[in-house]
Amino acid sequence: PQITYTEHDGATRVVEGNVGDSVMETAVRNGVPGIVAECGGSLSCATCHVFVDEDDLDRLDPMSEMEDEMLYGTAVDREDNSRLSCQLRLKDGCDLHVTTPETQV
Ligand code: FES
C-alpha cells in the first residue's frame, strides 16, 4: 500500500509500504521527517502523532484505550482525526494519507 506523508509546511512524500508494518515504521525506514517515535512503537511516547485524512479514518482499526490516553500527551493538541502512527498497521490495498504535526516534542 502507498502511504502519503504531508508535512506541516505542505511538503509531501509518497512511500510504498509493506503490509503488516506500521505507518511509523514505514516513515522511519524511508527517512520521512515529522515522526520522531522515541519509544520505537511501544505506545509510550506520543511522538509519532499524525492527522489521518478524513477519507481514510474509517478504514483504520479502532484505537485502543491506551492510544486514546496517550493522544492527550502529544506536543501539538489532538484533533478528531489524530492517531499514533505506530498503531496503524498497513493493510493490503489500503492506501493512507497522513499529515504530520508541526512538532512532536
Ligand atoms: Fe511511541 Fe508511537 S512510537 S507511541
Image (cartoon, helix red, strand yellow):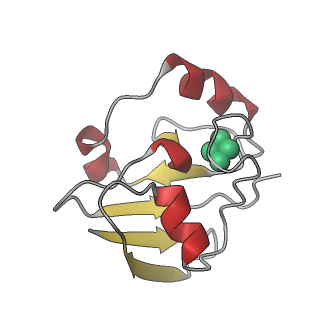
- Residue farthest along the top direction in this orientation: 65
In the image, 19 versus 36, the foreground residue is 19
> Going 32% across and 61% down the picture, which residue do you hit?
96
Quarter of the figure with residue 60: top left
> Going 32% across and 35% down the picture, which residue do you hit?
61
Image coords of residue 82 (percent x, y):
52, 41
Image coords of residue 35 (percent x, y):
65, 62
How many discs mark residues in the rendered view? Answer: 0
In the picture shown, does residue 86 fall above or below 10?
Answer: above
Left or right position of 8 against 98:
right
Image coords of residue 62 (percent x, y):
35, 29
> Going 42% across and 46% down the picture, which residue do you hit?
88
In the picture shown, does residue 8 fall above or below 13?
Answer: above
Q: Give ligand 1's quarter of the image.
A: top right
Left or right position of 24 against 70:
left
The quarter of the picture where the N terminus appears is: bottom left
Left or right position of 47 against 85:
right
In the picture shown, does residue 61 fall above or below 22?
Answer: above
- Residue farthest along the right direction in this orientation: 105
In the image, 105 versus 92, the foreground residue is 92
In the picture shown, does residue 82 fall above or below 5?
Answer: above
